[in-house]
């Protein structure tokens, strides 16, 4: 019986076909008589039974040869490799080792050609076979690594980490085996393919790291730009002397001294009032004196840096007087009553100031700046100095041509009307096909004509009319004119005592704007009467700016409806219940309170459908029902919502962006992509109330070097 031990070899198993290498503790029992390989238990029985047999001599010889021959070969090979390493490497590359030839002969009978190709391509039989060797070279994924019989089988593939198996194998092997494994591992060098893959992974990691750094830098720059933009938008006049970029703002309590002094002033007022009632005149005079000193020191300061150097001394002096007053006059109930009275008084003052602010803002929105009034007066004088033959506009034959693009603009503001016309023409693809119908009042008729005679809109056609010359527009035909002549309406608008209306809140004040009394504002409900020979017209307000060509609006299919407009509702905002009185049965029965509102300012009107559906008659009906202002307050949008209810086709929101006259948080991308931007609200671009961030969109269409503008001190 041959007992053969092999070291440093783990059990390797190919599932199909089965092939085994056994580890150190595994014994291979070979029967030299019949070449059968039994299992372990059978091998033990055979070894016992054959102890007395006649094969001992043969076994002894074979054992001697099997042990001595490998030792001799290893000694000779080691000496030869030390003497001529290079020659040995070359010889191993050119000729096959005898072990490799022997292994191939035995393996060919067990494995298919494909498996043999994998083994030959991935195995170097000149080196000892080990776990590190298996992990180092790309063997097939069907190979599995197994341990001893008393250890759990470990199945792994080459996709697992290199650091998992060697550690666990070394923990189970003897010290000598671990040393040999380490020596074997150091002899292997990564193949070029693995080196290339490792370099590729490194490049991907570096590229990803660079991308992350770039994204972080872009984010930082974006936040910085946003902060700069916000700082530019904020008006410094509103902030006063306080600035978020000042160094002292880094301290969270930059106004602690100011607030303490203001608190002292409040308590000084309380104790001075109590001292006067208790006849403590000396203390009363001291409190008043310190109160005046603190008031002069604080002034309009909003942070500690704004206080004078003497503020701390006055703070200390006031503290001493207050401490004295507390000792002599403190009464918890009395102090509480005084503070409550002061709080109520301050609350009333705040309410009064809010009302005054609202009235002033509405007044500022109603009035026209002196510079624009100056411009209108100068233009009017120049117009009436012209001879009659020079007061006519060219291309009057285009005014009734239905094949051209017609615009309706009703305004008494020369500068605003010029911006609308100039912005439309400058962004039009075919300016010669555009016709502008301007209507103004008799006060601005000469100025409007003179301005466009001096500044004609290129090849476009323009025509100016006077609303007071529309003799058909009278109180017998128009309900609004009839209502404006009533005594109740005159009292509502021109009554000397309007305190009751003012006390009702700011919502009523805006309806006292003169535009609601002007027929220029209500003329939009009479478009077919004003332009009887036109089929379609685009209505524009005078507080808009055109940024794109609008000719595509004439090609929009209104699906048999009369009005094409952009809807303004968002959730519960700008819906019908915001404008109409749904407590009235006439409104609640005929309209949906959640119906979406839409905006005036840029509207496409199909005048043919208008005439068919008698839109003006519908308007007259509801306007007569609202003579007591019980259905809606004054204005043109509520009657417009009623008149065009169910007859409005929604347009894409990019055609008309609103809110530049009251909303400071409109996204700039929306403004840039809009065909028309609308300064609806009180902060008109020609007023000082205008928001500075939106004003450049309007001013870029004005030539401030014009002689008339210079004479009237009009500037950006």
Image: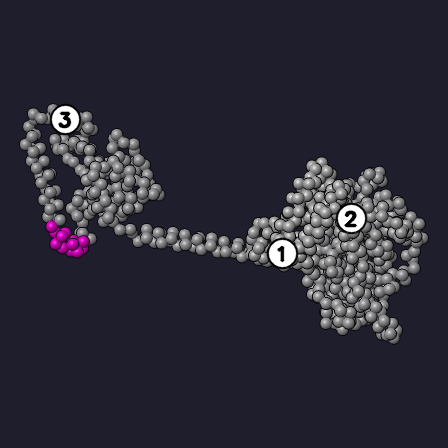
- Secondary element at tag 3: helix
Q: Which residue sits at x=64%, y=52%?
A: 314
Whole-number angstrom distance, CA of label 2 to CA of label 1: 35 Å
The residue that disc 1 covers is 310
Give the class, few, some or many, for how many residues have Cα within 10 Å of label 2's Cα (few <14, many ≥20): few
Q: Where is residue 148 in the image (x, y as percent from the top left)?
A: 25, 33
Res 588 quadrant in image: top right
Magenta stretch: give its range: 79-90
- Which of the two marks, 2 or 3, is nearer to us in this view? 2
Whole-number angstrom distance, CA of label 3 to CA of label 1: 115 Å
Labels 2 and 3: the sequence-earlier one: 3
- Secondary element at tag 1: loop
Residue 81 falls within the magenta-colored stretch = yes
Give the class, few, some or many, for how many residues have Cα within 10 Å of label 3's Cα (few <14, many ≥20): some
User: Main structural element of the magenta stretch: helix, strand or loop?
Assistant: helix
Res 166 quadrant in image: top left
| Number of marks | 3
The residue that disc 2 covers is 352
Q: Position of residue 55 (x, y in %)?
A: 7, 30
- Which of the two marks, 3 or 1, is nearer to us in this view? 1
Q: Which residue sits at x=19%, y=28%?
A: 40
């Amino acid at each position: 019986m041959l007992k053969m031990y092999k070291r440093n070899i783990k059990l390797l198993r190919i599932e199909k076909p089965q092939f085994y290498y056994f580890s150190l503790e595994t014994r291979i029992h070979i029967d030299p008589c019949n070449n059968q390989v039994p299992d372990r238990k059978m091998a033990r029985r055979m070894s016992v039974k054959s102890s007395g047999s006649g094969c001992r001599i043969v076994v002894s010889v074979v054992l001697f040869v099997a042990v001595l021959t490998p030792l001799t070969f290893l000694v000779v090979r080691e000496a030869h490799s030390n003497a001529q390493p290079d020659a040995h490497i070359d010889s191993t590359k050119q000729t096959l080792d005898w072990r490799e030839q022997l292994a191939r002969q035995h393996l060919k009978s067990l494995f298919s050609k494909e498996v043999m190709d994998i083994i030959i391509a991935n195995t170097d039989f000149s080196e000892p076979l080990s776990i590190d060797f298996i992990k180092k070279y790309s063997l097939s994924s069907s190979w599995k690594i197994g341990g001893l019989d008393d250890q759990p089988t470990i199945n792994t593939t080459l996709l697992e980490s290199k650091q998992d198996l060697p550690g666990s194998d070394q923990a189970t092997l003897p010290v000598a085996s671990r040393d040999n494994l380490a020596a074997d591992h150091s002899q292997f060098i990564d193949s070029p393919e693995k080196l290339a893959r490792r370099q590729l992974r490194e490049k991907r990691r570096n590229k990803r790291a660079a991308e992350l750094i770039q994204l972080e830098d872009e984010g930082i720059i974006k936040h910085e730009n946003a902060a700069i933009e916000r700082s530019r938008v904020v008006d410094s006049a509103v902030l006063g002397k306080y600035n978020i970029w000042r160094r002292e703002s880094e301290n969270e309590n930059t106004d602690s001294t100011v607030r303490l002094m203001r608190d002292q002033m409040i308590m000084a007022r309380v104790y001075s009032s109590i001292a006067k009632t208790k006849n403590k005149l000396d203390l009363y005079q001291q409190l008043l004196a310190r109160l005046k000193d603190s008031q002069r020191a604080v002034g309009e300061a909003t942070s500690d840096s704004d206080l004078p150097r003497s503020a701390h001394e006055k703070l200390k002096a006031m503290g001493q007087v207050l401490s004295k007053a507390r000792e002599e006059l403190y009464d918890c109930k009395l102090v509480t009553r005084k503070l409550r009275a002061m709080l109520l008084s301050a609350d009333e003052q705040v309410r009064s100031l809010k009302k005054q602010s609202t009235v002033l803002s509405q007044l500022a929105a109603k009035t026209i700046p002196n510079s624009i009034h100056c411009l209108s007066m100068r233009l009017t004088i120049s117009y009436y100095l012209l001879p009659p033959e020079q007061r006519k506009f060219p291309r009057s034959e285009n005014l009734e041509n239905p094949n051209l693009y017609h615009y309706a603009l009703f305004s008494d503001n020369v500068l605003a009307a010029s911006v609308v016309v100039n912005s439309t023409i400058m962004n039009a693809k075919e300016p010669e096909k555009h016709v502008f119908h301007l209507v103004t009042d008799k006060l601005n008729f000469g100025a409007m004509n003179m301005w466009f005679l001096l500044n004609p809109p290129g090849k476009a056609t323009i025509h100016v009319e006077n609303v007071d010359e529309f003799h058909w527009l009278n109180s017998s035909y128009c309900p609004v004119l009839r209502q404006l002549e009533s005594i109740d309406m005159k009292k509502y608008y021109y009554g000397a005592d309007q305190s009751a209306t003012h006390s009702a809140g700011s919502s009523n004040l805006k309806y006292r704007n003169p535009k609601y009394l002007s027929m220029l504002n209500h003329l939009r409900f009479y478009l077919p009467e004003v332009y009887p020979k036109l089929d379609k017209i685009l209505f524009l307000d005078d507080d808009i700016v055109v940024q794109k060509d609008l000719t595509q609006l004439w090609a929009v299919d209104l699906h048999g409806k009369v009005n094409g407009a952009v809807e303004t509702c968002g959730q519960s905002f700008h819906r019908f219940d915001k404008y109409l009185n749904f407590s009235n049965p006439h409104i609640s029965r005929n309209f949906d309170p959640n119906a979406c509102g839409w905006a005036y300012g840029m509207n496409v009107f199909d005048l043919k459908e208008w005439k068919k559906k008698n839109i003006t008659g519908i308007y007259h009906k509801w306007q007569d029902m609202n003579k007591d202002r019980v259905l809606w307050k004054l204005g043109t949008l509520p009657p417009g919502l009623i008149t065009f209810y169910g007859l409005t086709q929604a347009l894409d929101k990019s055609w008309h962006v609103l809110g530049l006259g009251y909303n400071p948080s409109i996204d700039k991308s929306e403004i840039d992509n809009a065909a028309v931007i609308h300064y609806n609200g009180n902060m008109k671009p020609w007023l000082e109330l205008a928001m500075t961030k939106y004003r450049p969109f309007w001013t870029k269409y004005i030539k401030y070097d014009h002689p008339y503008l210079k004479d009237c001190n009009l500037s950006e």
